[in-house]
Image (spheres, helix red, strand yellow):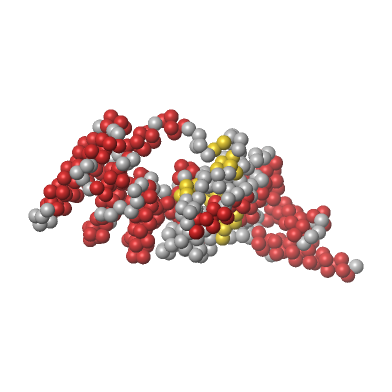
Amino acid sequence: MNFFEALLASDIRESATRYSSAWAKVGGKYQPLAELAGALAISPRQELVDHLRHALIEMPPTESRHVANPMLRCQIYLAYFGDPDSAWAVSRRLTQDALEIPPSAECPSMFKRALAWSHLAVSLDSEFLKFSMSPNMMKEIIRNGDELLDGVFKVALPSTARLADPQHAKEKPANHSDEGGVVVIPAIGNKLTSEGRDISASFSAFVGTRLPYPAMVNSTHVRQNLVMEFPYASEAIEGILAQLSGLNRPRVRPTVLVGEPGSGKTRFARRLFEELGMAYTLVSCGGTSDSAIGGTPRRWKTGAPCIAISAACRANSCGPGVILDEFEKVATGGHGGSIHAVLIGLFEDETARRWYDPYLQMECDLSLVSWILTANDLEGVPKPLLDRCRVVRFPRPNRSHLAALSGSILSRIYSERGFDHRWAIPLDEIERQAILSVWDGGSLRQLNRLMECVIEAREQMLSRQ
């Protein structure tokens, strides 16, 4: 079995990317495996490796020949993370392989590898050894084993010990500052290549620079303004703003707004970010079918950084907003990776804080980005993704909301046409009845068109006078 990189995280990303692409092409029963491998390529974490291992176990026996190598690789990775059962499994697999092949010079070597893995499994079963064994001791254990494993295991136990230290978990990330903001892009990887030099020049203003936090605003004013514009959504507004209480800077946790078409979800998301004083990027997801939202490799002609990195640079802020509009319409089954898998990684704080961008070839800090997804329904949206989001039901307006809605809509239309918003005279009774005769609540798009008809009728009446 070949290993692609010296560092475990890099090797997981590379192998998971290859498996995800191959399984996506096959489709069918392999599609869930492709989704899991795609998530693992983005976030090389122990729990995702274990999820993939369990999914491989659930595959039908007829597919065992096709999943044996991915299974072995998962077990090797899990052994690195300190799982003795996985180390035993690798030892058994090597022993079985050695017994099945005809006697040859290779047999003693395979038995030595199996013995080395057994030794490792016993060592991992000891809590003392698990957290105190030096890299040299670890290398001695696998000295007579597969040399390709040396790069995989050489940093295993020091990393495990560091992660196991509760004091380490409490440390503030080095690129965070209470006053100066956050370094989103610490450096550009492989910057000595021609592409690296061009990218370095393009992002020179942001590399190593602390981008400021969004300024905190008065949540009472935000609530009042939003309720005035969206009187039918007061409960949703309260729920979303409640998560901001106690924070020293605004950040909207991943939120999915679900409601009927035309209920005003997208406009509400935009207005929320505007009221919070946060610059935002709006992405239409209709027909989008790959993982480009998480960044695409620089070797491609369409190479580009993660959309959240672009948003942070445009806003000159470490905490911009990103709106993914009509998220349920993203296409699935493409060969360019999974948007769902990308977002699962971006919505995890620890993963987002060390987001590996394939364009910049560097781990970037996207932990303060605010995400809002809009959807007409949740059909086809994976549960693991929804588990990482707050799902908010966005209601539809009814006839009783006409008076409040008409004022804000008329004011906005007049402003967009270059007139003073004071031209937005409230509806008279005749206009109100005319609208209610064709609008029974629901779509704000229809109500906007009716308001435009009212304005045109008023202008025609003025021209006759």
Residue 61 vs 135, above or below: the answer is below
Q: Is residue 333 left or right of residue 310?
A: left
- Residue 282 horizontal/vertical position (percent): 59, 56
Q: How many marks?
A: 0
Residue 165 occupies quadrant:
top left
Look at 12% across and 56% down and name the residue there: 101
Q: Is residue 422 left or right of residue 408?
A: right
Residue 433 seen in the figure: no
Q: Nearer the viewer, residue 198 or 448?
A: 198
Q: Nearer the viewer, residue 123 or 207?
A: 207
Q: Is residue 459 left or right of residue 44?
A: right
The quadrant the N terminus occupies is bottom left
- Residue 175 horizontal/vertical position (percent): 53, 39
- The furthest residue to the right: 465
Look at 66% across and 46% down and name the residue there: 277
- The furthest residue to the left: 103
- Residue 136 horizontal/vertical position (percent): 27, 36
Look at 65% across and 39% down and name the residue there: 216
Look at 30% across and 39% down and name the residue there: 82
- The furthest residue to the bottom: 464
Residue 310 vs 166, above or below: the answer is below
Residue 188 seen in the figure: yes
- Residue 256 horizontal/vertical position (percent): 53, 51
Q: Nearer the viewer, residue 37 or 437?
A: 37
The quadrant the C terminus occupies is bottom right
Residue 162 occupies quadrant:
top left
